[in-house]
Amino acid sequence: MKEHKKLPPIKAAQKFINSQFPHCDAALLAGSVVRGEATETSDLDIVIFDKNFSSSYRESLIDLGWKIEIFAHNLISYKAFFKSDYERARPSMPRMVSEGIVLKDNGIIEVIKNEAEDLLAKGPEQWSIETIMAKRYFITDALDDFIGCDSRAEGIFIANTLAELLSEFVLRTNHRWVGASKWIVRSLRKYDVEFAEHFVRAFDDFYKNGNKKQIIQLADFVLLPYGGRLFDGFSLGKNDSCS
């Protein structure tokens, strides 16, 4: 059987909406295909708004030769996702809405896009001094484990933890959004390209050559403006009645 040529992403998304959600109030195409970062395994991220949906839901399927991720919302439910993303400092939903290409609009998208863009411009909530101290302690703890570790297998996964903790610390203390997985590097590059490349080199050197030095130096560099490593005197959850 002859295989049909895959439609371009925007045409495929438009056809999918017209066929599967013809009565929705609005729809957006977002994700890597919109940002020009698509790979062979990329899917179509489609955000759908419909006042008749009882609640938000997410669904994955294959249609028109594409993997498709549906992010469905009514005209209120998306606000809870905006709020949750703001609190965790990972603006997945606002970013999709902000960058999304309009596939359909019954006059509601401009307001929702403005909400998303305002939230993205605002940035995440500023960390408190107490939170910064706690994060310094957790980085110090992981760094001590990393320095003292003589097991290659264990060191790999301690390094993974340090990468997450250090990237989060740098971004949050600079009032920037954080990311997970591939978005760690993307978020760091958006903050500071030169720092991001230094960050990547440090971990790449360890993974390739087993050299811990650059990661240790990176951690100390990141912590230095906030008092450096923290162990002695740190406490969590202690109150006056415990003394």
Image (cartoon, helix red, strand yellow):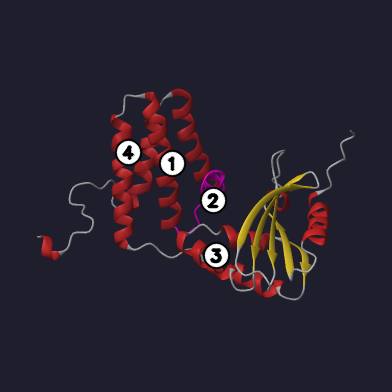
In what element is the residue under mark 1?
helix
Q: Position of residue 227 (x, y in %)?
A: 28, 52
Q: Position of residue 91 (x, y in %)?
A: 55, 59
**Would you name the residue on which mark 1 appears?**
163
Choose the circle earlier in sequence order: 4 or 3. 3
**Would you name the residue on which mark 3 appears?**
81
Q: Position of residue 88 (x, y in %)?
A: 46, 59
Choose the circle earlier in sequence order: 2 or 3. 3
For the residues carrying marks 4 and 3, which lies nearer the camera in this image?
Answer: 3
Which residue appears at 22% of the width and 46% of the height? 231
Q: Which mark is residue 187?
A: 2
Q: Which residues are magenta?
A: 174-190
Q: Split into 4 quadrants, where in the image is the C terminus? A: bottom left
Q: Which one is nearer the viewer's eye here, 10 or 222?
A: 10
* Distance Cα–Cα, label 2 vs label 1: 13 Å
Residues tagged 1 and 4 counted as in contact (Cβ below 8 A) = no
* Distance Cα–Cα, label 1 vs label 4: 11 Å
Specify few, some or many for label 3: CA neighbours under 10 Å numbering under 14, 14-19, or 20 or more.
some
In what element is the residue under mark 4?
helix
**Would you name the residue on which mark 4 appears?**
143
Choose the circle earlier in sequence order: 4 or 2. 4
Choose the circle earlier in sequence order: 2 or 1. 1
Specify few, some or many for label 1: CA neighbours under 10 Å numbering under 14, 14-19, or 20 or more.
many
Placement of 146 over or under 11, stated as above or below: above
